[in-house]
Amino acid sequence: MKQEIPSLNDKGTLLFTYPYIFKDYGFDAAPCALKDLPVWIANFPETGERFSSNAAQKAVEEALCLRTDGRNRCVFQLYSSFGGFAQFDSDEALDLDRFFGTEQEFTTWLQTISR
């Protein structure tokens, strides 16, 4: 009996992953359409840029993030675990993330999240 796999695309779902995990585990071919979900990428380029300066690593990152139609599917990026603010203990790690889009796009995305 074939089991129907529910769609997550209309639920505001993000896939949080590292580029090499997505590639090495073949998530792009997963039967639950992981390849279609927007991504919150955990990626720590040495220069702080969006993609790595290493050509092989950059190719993996771009294959995950850039759709064939030119749109970006990586909407958030965890780019550092060494952030700090006056309100937090300086000995504790604090993740730093960025959103790739406008404030209006972020607001629209927030409204799609199922509660």
Image (cartoon, helix red, strand yellow):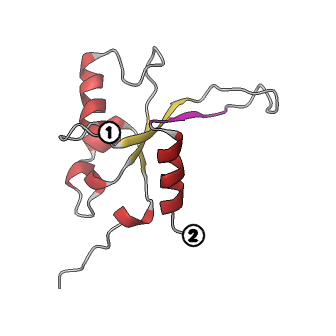
Q: Is residue 11 left or right of residue 9?
A: right
Say which quadrant the N terminus sits in.
bottom left
Three-letter code, disc 2: Arg
The front one of 77 and 30 is 77
Q: Position of residue 63 (x, y in %)?
A: 24, 35
Q: Is residue 108 magenta?
A: no
Q: Is residue 15 above or below residue 8?
A: above
- Residue at the image point whose x is 24% and y is 26% from the top: 59
- Residue at the image point whose x is 23% and y is 80% from the top: 3
Q: Position of residue 83 (x, y in %)?
A: 65, 26
Three-letter code, disc 1: Asn
Q: Which residue appears farthest toward the front when viewing the image?
A: 104
The front one of 107 and 68 is 107
Q: Is residue 68 left or right of residue 9?
A: left
Q: Residues within 10 Å of mark 1 (few under 14, many from 20)?
A: some
Q: Secondary structure at mark 1?
A: loop
Q: Does the CB distance between marks 1 and 2 fall below 8 Å?
A: no
> What residue sits right under mark 1 in the picture?
72
Residue 21: quadrant of the picture: top left
Q: Position of residue 46 (x, y in %)?
A: 45, 16
Q: Position of residue 61 (x, y in %)?
A: 31, 31
Q: Is residue 98 magenta?
A: yes
Q: Is residue 109 above or below residue 102?
A: below
Distance Cα–Cα, label 1 vs label 2: 25 Å
- Residue at the image point whose x is 39% and y is 46% from the top: 39
Q: Secondary structure at mark 2?
A: loop
The magenta segment: 94-100
Answer with mark 1 or mark 2, whichever residue precedes in sequence.
1
> What residue sits right under mark 2 in the picture?
115
Q: Is residue 66 above or below residue 59?
A: below
